[in-house]
Image: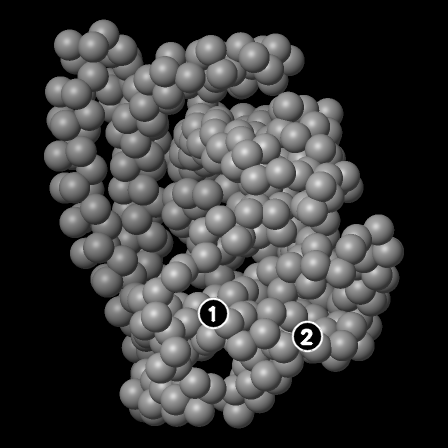
Amino acid sequence: MNKNKKEDKDNTNQNELINKFLDVNNQVKKIIAKISVYEIHNHIINLEDKINSNKKLLESFEDEYISIMSIKKSLLNNIKEISINDYKYYKLLRKNIRELYILLSIYTNELDIYEEIFFSELTNSNSDIKHINIRKLTNHIKNINNKNPKLLKQKMPQVVRVLPMYITKDKYFSYIKRTILKNFTSSSKDYCKELISMYKSYFAGYFYTDYGMKFDKYFYFIEELKISKLKSIDSDKLEKKHETMIQMFKEIYDLSEIIRLMGIITNKLIILTLVDIQISEENILDVQLENSKKDSNIKKNNKEIDKLYKELNVANKELELIMEDIKDNHDISRQMRVTEKIVSYFQDKTLVSIRMIENGEDVVQTEYLKILTGNFVDYMRRCMKGMDKREKKIRMKRLLSMIGIPFETVEEFISYLEYSINRCNDNQDRLKYLSNVYNVLDH
């Protein structure tokens, strides 16, 4: 009898906790939605400013300008009539915006690669680095690891980026395979497919959707660099090319910011399709774009946003405490997945994040991940056939620095570093790479 009473009491307590969870969870979602409404308001003002200040640049890409203005119009037209039925529409819109954003980031990446190939000598440091040696550097790394191993892990990919690439292709591909398999075996199948696709684009962007078709001015300049021979270009022409490249970096940044803002607005609109909140009741989406009201509107909105963030922090802490005491429950898990999806869109500021497509239910099979990774390695091998030695090594080290930490231990990392630097035949180059590593570790 006493046992039954205890069970009834436990069940009552659990039911109370579940009801409390549902209330607080809904509160969290509604606070996020309210913040999103104010942020949409601010982002629309900023978007309008950026489009106006870059109108001449945008108009130089006729088709892309029409596309961007069409997206902007579609974002603003039905902003007060959002419902759950709009979810798929805004997801598709986000996909299109994201593809444009990634295309521009690929142009940036390709320009960056050719800047390193052609123009690194223009920016080499002439500082006195004769006091640096490999033994001091490895001791410095060990000291960092003893004091702050987490910091060293964060720095490892950056160090790989500034080192020369001397390992064999087989060793390199083993690093790639091992790192992908280690880092993503518990991820979803769709996430892994998207991840490998992104790695392919950043290793060699010219196979990406619309590469060379949209914003083609950057494509033609990159192609011109690709067929250029460094030794045949005199220093004056090289300097002019570098100036053109710097201007293109700035242009792409400005275009990317416009597209990024449209993507963030879309993220916020997706949130509003997922949360039951009446937008019109907030009465703040009548965006005032007159110069006299822009700053005051943003200032007013930011005050409200600050208040709401404080409420969100309190609600999140309360939710965490409730979750500690709730037993496994299917309905709670389902509710949490929805909230996590909302939070993902809320936190996504770069559009490159692909955690959105994680569903937690379709975990990738190891064999399938091996096949994906194997296909990726085959893709890199094919791409490398058309590259000269220097370009190949630069692309290889950039990808290795991108995929995470390819080393199992600090000792393996140090061994890789020592091998990379000791293979340098030129003493000045060796000192330069040592200096580069120090700069990464200490800044």
Res 235 → quadrant: top right
Image quadrant occupied by the C terminus: bottom left
Res 388 → quadrant: bottom right
Image quadrant occupied by the N terminus: bottom left
> Badge 2: few (under 14), some or many (20 or more) residues near its Cα, within 10 Å?
some
To which residue does mark 1 refer? 432
Give x and y (percent) for residue 359: 60, 56
Apparent side of residue 426 relative to residue 46 in the rendered image (left or right): right
Apparent side of residue 417 relative to residue 212 in the rendered image (left or right): left
Residue 165 - label:
none
Res 439 → quadrant: bottom left
The residue closer to the viewer here, 167 or 405, is: 167
> Badge 1: few (under 14), some or many (20 or more) residues near its Cα, within 10 Å?
many
Give x and y (percent) for residue 346: 39, 44
Q: Say which label, 1 or 2, has the lower sequence index.
A: 2
Rendered residue at 49%/49% (across/down): 122
Residue 166 - label:
2
Asked whether residue 7 appears in the rendered view, the answer is no
Asked whether residue 423 appears in the rendered view, the answer is yes
Report the label total: 2
Give x and y (percent) for residue 406: 60, 76
Q: Secondary structure at mark 2?
A: loop
Q: Please, is residue 232 above or below residue 129 in the view?
A: above
Rendered residue at 36%/16% (across/down): 53
Q: Amino acid at mark 1?
A: Lys
Q: Please, is residue 166 above or below residue 198 in the view?
A: below
Rendered residue at 39%/78% (across/down): 130
Q: Amino acid at mark 2?
A: Tyr
Q: Secondary structure at mark 1?
A: helix
The residue closer to the viewer here, 146 or 320, is: 146
